[in-house]
Image (cartoon, grey):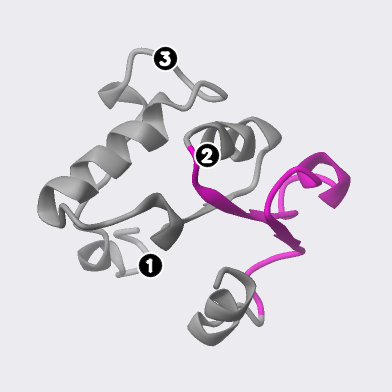
Amino acid sequence: LTALKIREHFPIIVAADDVTKSKPDPETYLKCFARLQETDPTLQKSECIVIEDTSGGAQSALDAGIAVLGLATTGPAEKLAHATRVEPNLAGVTVERLMEWFP
């Protein structure tokens, strides 16, 4: 995020060091959602999207109750078939498309 100069757009980050159970356990996404809710108590999981490129990560987010945009950048799309939506990469993914795909 820092290298891409977009770190300031991510006020909350939950990393492997912040959890006791790793993916595919949903702890990472549950903890992240809880931290987001601290800043906005009205936030609902239905207003969130997780972007994942692994099957275990996608399952983790789904088990946390959050929709998943699966990116087939590190493996075949078939391994992400359980994601809410699968795209080959981020090319062409816009806020407008996200709002269409995840109403």
Residue 46 to residue 76: above or below: below
Q: Is residue 38 in the magenta section?
A: no
The percent coordinates of residue 92 (x first, y second) are 66, 82
- For the point 27% across and 45% down, the residue is 13
Residue bearing mark 3 = 21
Q: Is residue 7 left or right of residue 23?
A: left
Q: Is residue 101 left or right of residue 41?
A: right
Q: Is residue 73 in the magenta section?
A: yes
Q: Is residue 81 left or right of residue 63?
A: right
Q: Is residue 7 left or right of residue 22?
A: left
- Foreground mark, 3 or 2, reads 2
Residue bearing mark 1 = 4
Q: Quadrant of residue 63?
A: top right
Query: Element at badge 2?
Result: helix
Query: Element at badge 1?
Result: loop
Q: Which residues are magenta?
A: 65-91
- Disc number for residue 45: none
State the CA–CA distance, disc 1 to disc 2: 24 Å
Residue type, mark 3 in image: Lys
Residue bearing mark 2 = 61
- Foreground mark, 1 or 2, reads 2
Q: Residue furthest top?
A: 20
The percent coordinates of residue 52 (x first, y second) are 58, 48
Q: Residue furthest left?
A: 39
The percent coordinates of residue 57 (x first, y second) are 58, 35
State the CA–CA distance, disc 3 to disc 2: 13 Å
Quadrant of the snapshot with the C terminus: bottom right
Question: Which numbered disc flags the more N-terminal residue, 1 or 2?
Answer: 1
Residue type, mark 2 in image: Ala
